[in-house]
Image (spheres, helix red, strand yellow):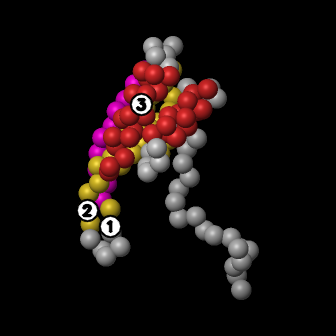
Amino acid sequence: MFNDRKSGDKMSTTTPTPSNVVLVGKKPVMNYVLAALTLLNQGVPEIVIKARGRAISKAVDTVEIVRNRFLPDKIEIKSIGIGSQVVTSQDGRQSRVSTIEVTIRKKA
């Protein structure tokens, strides 16, 4: 009775991703390289490449491919952050998952 939503609308449970972030997951590495290059070519001054768990190696590969193969001597690493998150599985168990955030930017 007090619901203003349309019947087809879904509520979002995740927070929106900022426009300068590339979230690395299960796709091939070159997909993330292309996303990073697209952001840099659109004029975004710095981008953040984030991953967790088994995708961390893909995030590192993404940064290295952008730095060494596509934009050599034009990109620098601003910061690297590592950490862990507590993740609750469907059966209620909690486990820790490693995370990484690599911030890269164009050299001045």
Disc 3 on helix, strand or loop?
A: helix
Q: Is residue 31 left or right of residue 89?
A: right
Residue annotated with mark 3: 63
Say which of 78 and 25 sits in front. Answer: 25
Q: Are marks 3 and 1 in contact (CB under 8 Å)?
A: no
30 versus 86 height, above or below:
above
* Chain part drawn in magenta: 76-86
For the point 61% across and 26% down, which residue is it?
A: 41
Task: Tell me if residue 102 is in the magenta stretch.
Answer: no
Name the quadrant containing residue 6: bottom right
* Type of secondary structure dominating the magenta stretch: strand
Q: In the image, what residue occupies the spot 29% across and 49% down?
A: 98
Residue 83, located in which quarter of the rendered image? top left
Residue at mark 1 to residue at mark 2: CA–CA distance: 6 Å
Is residue 38 in view? yes
Is the residue 96 above or below the residue 5 in the image?
Answer: above
Mark toward the start of the polypeptide (2 vs 3): 3
Give the residue type that dot 2 points to: Ser
Can residue 78 be seen at all in this image of the molecule?
no
Residue at image point 31% right, 76% down: 91
Q: Of the residues shown, which amino acid type is indicated by label 1? A: Thr
User: In the depicted view, which residue is nearer to us: 30 or 83?
Assistant: 30
Q: Which label sits on residue 95? A: 2
Q: Which residue is mark 1?
A: 88
On the image, the x and y values in percent for residue 95 come to: 25, 62
> Residue 25: where, in percent of width, then height?
43, 49
Dot 1 alpha-carbon crowd within 10 angstroms: few under 14, some 14 to 19, many 20 or more: few
